[in-house]
Every structure is written in structure tokens, then in C-alpha cells.
Amino acid sequence: MNPWQLLGITATSNKRAIKQAYATKLKLLVPDEQPEEFQRLKTAFDLALTLAKNDSLIEDDAYNLFADMSDSFESVAPSIEDDMYNHEGLVFPASQTKSSFSDALQQIIRYENYFGNLAVWEKLVASINEWSIDEYMQNTYTIQLFLVENYSCLAREIIRFLFKTFDLTNLTDHIGQELFVSSTFLYLKKTIYTVPPFSFQLAETIPANLRKQYFTLRFDIYQLIAQKQGFAVNIEDLIAKCADLFAEDSELWNLKMIDWLDKTNGLVDTYESKELVEDFITRTQTMNDNPTTTFLIAYFQLVKGDAKDDSIFNWNKEQLTLPDELFILILGSIFFHKKDFVPAFNLWKQLSLSRKIALKKQLEDISRHLPRQEKKEYRQIKKEIRNVQKKKHPVLLALMQFFTFPVIIVAFAFLSNGTSDNHLPDETLSASQEHYMEEFSETKQLYDGPLEEQFVYYFYASNDPEGKQLFIDSTVYNDQLKERLEHYVYQDTNKYSDMSAFKFKSDALSDSENQKIAVYYKDEFLCILVFGKYKVLLDDIYGDQWQPLSDAQLESMSRSIRINPESTTTIFLRKFLFSDNKQQNLLEYTDYLSENMKIVIENNLNAPIPVNMEKGYLYLVREPQVKMIVSDLNKNEEKLILTFDESGRLAHVFGPNWEEVDEEMIHYSNREAFKNISTLLEEPD
């Protein structure tokens, strides 16, 4: 069998096709369990590359030398592989030095020139056809890690170029490929690929040291709006903070209008609304052009009656930094103002029920112009709105009682006496108001504490149907999760009485975008809570009675929470750096250590305890990657630098008596105080 047959392709000089064929075949193997098959495939790959670099070998009789190879291929091929680099003209010499892809990538990052400049990336991968398969796979992995870290400040054009170049769309964690696949990237892959089409044309006008911070914050603001978290975070404050970094970007002011349109359901019907619109148009006139600004201005002109043509219909959603639902809302509004009622209704019927309630009057106006089928759908929507409003009647009744009860008493006092001399005493009136205010306040307030404590209080430690429903309405946006939680609203969930016995373990440092918290009662595992950024909404719950996972999946998720930079640092300090029992701890806490660190610690088993650091300080560096800095009483001097791998394990410890220190990496101006070491050592396990 010749190399092309082993790779499953026809003879070709296209090196990328050869590499992709090899990668595809490799996914079907378990190299450790199938060493002979792996060696045969690897040899076929190397041989195919040799032939591809010399087209004549594919076409002339030299190719036929390999045509009849079958069982003897695996014994003959290694000798061919060994000699490949000795034949001049076939391949580059094995010793040829090439610029490191990783070094080139770091240089691009260092010069802050990677946000929107596609030419930079095309140059970076220009030699891709010269990479070996090992280089290709390693570089693919490097790009995954880069995208995870930087996708929020990259142009969509660049992200999609990298996806195509490295075939990231089809990336999976097949057996045999784990070393070259980032699980975090797989989790975020869709989010990364579908970033909004922000413009980065102003990057050069922003100070280099502020570019990443500005673009990342701009992206975060958009995400908060798109994920309906604007009610829990002050978007105005974030926009002001972003403007302090750089204020001459129309895309930033687009976000202000998008947030306002989202909160007002696209309605421009108040004096304040019209003032905001005029301010937006004036502010952005002299700024950079972009499709979203032009679209919004065209929309506002249409609403005001100033539109001169139908150019507003020429925009494609892909060009606009608008959340999907808001785009549907605005597009429906455009048709509504154009008096094109059927398409307006067909768009608006896709909106959430809360939006439909806000547009109740407009939908009623539209209904008069709808054909039979759409009228039937409108009646169903009207029924849904009525049902929701019925459910709110108890709260409305309480409000009505609060406001009308004192009035009724006053009226009764006047009528019963007929004079104005005998009126209700002030203390009676205030007591009534206080009673209703307290009753109303009690229905509104949630259990006092962070979200994870609120959750365990309502769903594990009490039986409070109203509280459960209020928690769901206030903190859960995911409809499927709402449905799961509402199943327990009227069930008795008072299983654990001692709130102080609940324990929470978090991976906040590892994943600030989707923070996970494992919940325990004493030593009993209960569930895993998943929160969005800033921990303002509960996104999901994993565990037996919630979102079920296989034992392996649950263990993997629990492990990712248990082993993170913070917990790993604590283990290192307590069990190794300041411990006399390093040998035993090395056996017990091996999960927290990379293979490199197991060797490093084994070599340091007899190292003395650094007493001068026991009263020192621990600092956190968040960007570009999480690191922990250990210093002694001299706060300005870094003694040890701890780095972590993707799994949260300790990857390196740089410093005296540990690993060699690179002078360039030991001064971090962006470090932040994290914890006093003596306090950490005294905390219970």
C-alpha cells in the first residue's frame, strides 16, 4: 500500500491537503495503544511530504517504487524516513533554523498591532505550507489559546481568517488529539466565531497601552446589553469609564443608543428620547463612519418622519453590532412606521413576551390590518399577555391596598361625622402606611447574601414559594433553567437547616466569563452553579436534580473548580514551600502539579523553609495570563513567580532555588494585592 492510500487521498503536491489528511487519520488512532499503525501513518505522511516537494517523483518512475509496498512498508519506511534529510534537493535540512511561530505571535502582541490589521496575520502564517505536521498542530493550539485570551478585542475578519487557516471550525477533542485541543476554546468556539462586527480602524489613534483595555471593555458592554444584564450593571457608568480611555469612537456611542433602545423597546416617543437622539446624531457626525451608526441615524430619521428613501432596508444584520432580538424589534418598528403591518407583526411575534407586553398598543393597532391567519396568531399573543397580567394581580392588589386603604379610612371618618373637626389621627394613618409598606417590602426583598447563598437558601434550606419565584424572576434569564427551577417553587425544599454548613468553591480566577461555583453541605456535594460575567445572573445548574451529567463530566467540571490558580497556589504554599513533609504531600497533591512541577519539587524536597517569606505578601497578575507573585516583607521585590497551565495546575515556579528566572518577566506593574501569606497559612483547609 503506497503512502497516498494510507492517507486516503490521491497523489498530490498540495502540502496542506496532505496535512489535513494526516490529521483526519490521526483522529482515528490511539497512538499509545496502536504504536505500529501510528508509525505507519507517520511514515506515510513524511514520505508524502517528500514527494510533494518534488513533483517529478509523483509523476515519473520514482513514484512506482512505492506503489507495491504493503506489509513491508512499515519496515522499509523508517529507513527512508531516517535518510530523508540526507538527500539534497528533497527537503530543507533538519537543522535549518526557522523563526518561531510563538515568538512572532508574541512580537505582534507586544507592538499592539493585532486588533484589526489582517495583513499582520497573513504574514504570520505565510509559511504554513513549510510547517511540519507537529509544528502545524502546535501552532494551531497556540492560536486557540490566543483567541481565548483575546477574542473580545479582535476584528471578526481576523477571527474568521484564523478559523479558516487552522480549520478551527471542525476542531474536536478526539482521542489522540487532547494535547493540541484547548477545552476552553471548544467551550467558547461559537462565542468567538460570532463576535459582533466592531470596527478597529481607530486602533492607531488610541494610546498603545490602552488599546486592549478599551476594546475589551467595549466588547463587555455589548455583551451585557445582549445578555440582558443591563438591569444589574450600570451601563452608563461603564460607557463613561470607556470614554475616559478614548471618547472619539462612534461605536462606543452606538452602544449607548443600543442600551437605551433595548430598555425603551425601540420607542422614540418622549421629549427625553428625542433629545438623546439629537445628541447622538450631533456627537457622531465628526467621528468614524460605521454601518451601525448609519443604520441607527436612518432609523431615527424614519421615526421622526425625516426619511427621504428606503435605504434603511439595505442593511444586512451581519454588518451591524446589534443583538439579534433588538435587530428584530427595530426592523419590525421600521415596517410599522412604513405602515407595512404584516411583516411588522411577523417580526414582532418572535420577540419575548415582555417585549410584546411593552408593544401591546402597537400590536393592537396592527391587528386591525392583519389577514385571518395573522389575526389568529395575534389573539393567541393577546391571551398570553392577559394570562401574565392576571398572575401579577396579587402584587397589584397589594399596591392598590397600600395606596387606597388610608384614603378609604379618611373618607369614612369624614362621612360618619359630617364635619372636618373629627379627622383620622396622624398616628393611625402613619401606622397603616407603615404596615402596608412593611408587607410590600417583604414581598420584594430577597434573602440577604450573594447569589449562591440566595440559591441554597431558597432551594435547599427553606420552603418559601414567593421567595423562590422572586429569586427566579430576578436572577434567571435562561428559559429552560427557569422552567426547571419553577418545578420546585411549590415543593418543600427545606432539607438542610444550617446555612452556616454550606460551603462554596469557585473558579473565579480561571474563568471570569463563566464563573462556576461548586456547592457542598458539610462534605456532601450538591450541585454546580454557573454564572455569567460579573456574576449578576444564574446561567445554569448541574447536578442530579438539575441538569444531569455523566459521572465523568461532573467529575471533570468539579475538578476544574477544585483545581484553579487560587487553590493551587494555596496547596503549593502550605504543602510544599512552607512544609517539612514535602515527600508525602507530593503523593497526596499530585493533581495540582504539572509533570514539570513534579520533577522540580522532587528535586527540592530538602530545600529549607523560606522563613523570610512567611510574613510576606501574595500578589495577583491577571493579564495577559494569570500569575501569582510571592514576595517577602519587601513588597517591591518578587521572590517567586507562579504560573499555571490550562487546567489550573502549577506549571512553573520561577525564582531562587526553583526554576531559572527570566529578568524580563519578574517586574509586573499591573499586579494587585491578593492575600497576606501568614493569613493564608492560618486559614482552615
Image (cartoon, rainbow, N blue to C red):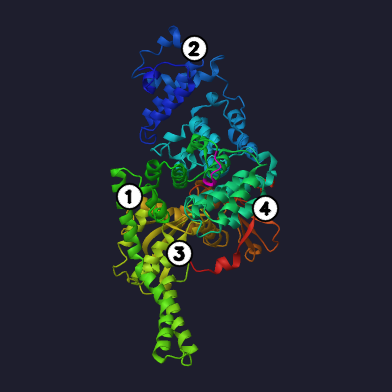
Crowding at mark 2 (Cα within 10 Å: few <14, some 14-19, many 20+): some
The reply to whether discs 1 and 3 touch (Cβ–Cβ < 8 Å) is: no
Crowding at mark 3 (Cα within 10 Å: few <14, some 14-19, many 20+): some
Mark 1 or mark 3: which is in front? 1
On the picture, is 278 further left or further right than 4?
A: right
Question: Split into 4 quadrants, where in the image is the N terminus?
Answer: top left
Q: Label 3 amino acid?
A: Leu
Label 3, on which residue? 451
For mark 4, give the secondary structure: helix
Classify 485 as above or below 103: below
Our reading of the magenta stretch's main secondary structure is: loop
The reply to whether discs 4 and 3 touch (Cβ–Cβ < 8 Å) is: no
Q: Label 4 amino acid?
A: Asp
- Residue 471 pos. (x, y %): 40, 65
- For the record, the magenta segment spans 303-307
Mark 1 or mark 4: which is in front? 1
Query: Of callouts 4 and 2, which one flags the residue occurring earlier in the amino acid sequence?
Result: 2
Residue 304 lies within the magenta run = yes
Mark 4 or mark 3: which is in front? 4
Query: Real-space Cα distance between discs 1 and 4?
Result: 47 Å
Residue placed furthest toward the front: 418
The reply to whether discs 1 and 2 touch (Cβ–Cβ < 8 Å) is: no
Disc sitting over residue 244 in the figure: 4
Crowding at mark 1 (Cα within 10 Å: few <14, some 14-19, many 20+): many
Label 2, on which residue? 55
- Residue 182 pos. (x, y %): 47, 42
Q: Label 1 amino acid?
A: Tyr
- Residue 671 pos. (x, y %): 64, 55
Query: Of callouts 1 and 4, which one flags the residue occurring earlier in the amino acid sequence?
Result: 4
Q: Is residue 542 visible?
A: no
Disc sitting over residue 378 in the figure: 1
